[in-house]
Image (cartoon, rainbow, N blue to C red):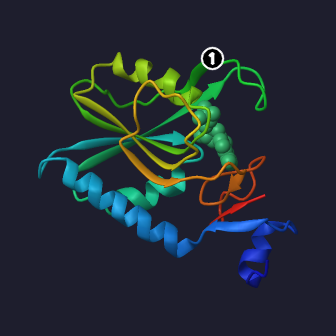
Amino acid sequence: MSTSPEVAAKQAGREFKRIVYSEEEIQDRVAEMAREITDAYEPGDEILVLGLLKGSFIFMADLVRSIHHPLQLDFLVASSYGNATESSGEVRLLYDPEASLEGRSVILVEDIIDSGTTLNRLIPLLEARGPKSLEVCALLHKRVATLDREVRWVGFDAPLEFLVGYGLDYSENYRHLPFIGSI
Ligand code: IMP
Ligand code: MG
C-alpha cells in the first residue's frame, strides 16, 4: 500500500493491510450523520453529547461541528475489568461526566461496537440518571454484538478486522490518522 510521506510519518514503519475508509468517505458520512441527528430533534432542542473516551474524540469533534442545535459536551471513560483480550463483562466508570443527565436529550458517542459489552453495561448506568432521552451514535458497528438496545445512528457496518485510525488505536498508536485502516 503506497502512502504519502505525511501519512507514512504517522505509521511508524508499519504497513496496513488496507485502507478500509478513506478520509473523504469518513468526512462525507460524518456530515450525513450530523444531518440525521439534526433532523431527529425539534428546532431549538438542546442536546448533551457524551463521548466515550478515548476512541470517540476525533469522530465527536467532527460530528458536533455539523450538528445544528444548541448543545453541550462531556466525556466519560469506561474500563472493563481484566485485560484487553479477555473481557470479564464488568465495566466501571473511570471518569464520570460532570454534567447532570436528568431531563436532558443525551447522545452517547462510541467509536466502534464490537462485543457490545461496554454499551450493554453503560446504558443502564446512564438511564438511571433520568435523561429525557438517551440515544447511541457509533461510527462503526461490527454487527456481531447482541445489544440490549439498538444503536440509533451508525456510520458504517465494519468488517471483522482490527481497525485503526480516526480515533481508533492499537496500543495507543494510530489515533491521529485521518483514515481508517486495518492491521
Ligand atoms: P465492545 O465492548 O467489545 O463493544 O468494545 C468496544 C471497544 O473496543 C471500542 O470502544 C474500542 O475501544 C475497542 N475496539 C473494538 N474493536 C476495535 C478495533 O477493530 N480497533 C480498535 N479498537 C477496537
Ligand atoms: Mg480502545
Q: Which quadrant: the N terminus? A: bottom right
Quarter of the image with the C terminus in it: bottom right
Residue 87, percent across and down? Answer: 71, 24
Residue 70 vertical placement versus 114 (above, below): below
Q: Ligand 1: give its quadrant.
A: top right
Q: Which residue is mark 1?
A: 90
Left or right of 143 in this view: 37: left
Q: Is residue 62 above or below residue 170?
A: below
* SS at mark 1 in the image: loop
- Circle 1 residues within 10 Å: few <14, some 14–19, many ≥20: few
Residue drawn at x 22%, y 28% is 132
55 to the left or right of 152: right
- Furthest toward the left, the residue is 43
Q: Is residue 166 above or below residue 119?
A: below
Query: Which residue is rendered at x = 31% and y = 45% of the image?
Result: 72
The residue carrying mark 1 has its beta carbon less than 8 Å from ligand 1 = no
- Which residue type carries mark 1? Glu
Q: Is residue 17 left or right of residue 62?
A: right
Q: Nearer the viewer, residue 54 or 162?
A: 162
Please state the horizontal and vertical placement of residue 9, each as a whole percent of the image: 79, 74
Name the residue rendered at 60%, 21% in the picture: 91
Quarter occupied by residue 99: top left
Q: Position of residue 141 (x, y in %)?
A: 53, 46
In the image: residue 6, left or right of residue 32: right
Q: Nearer the viewer, residue 75 or 89?
A: 89
Where is residue 14? Give x, y as percent.
86, 65
Q: Is residue 7 above or below residue 56?
A: below
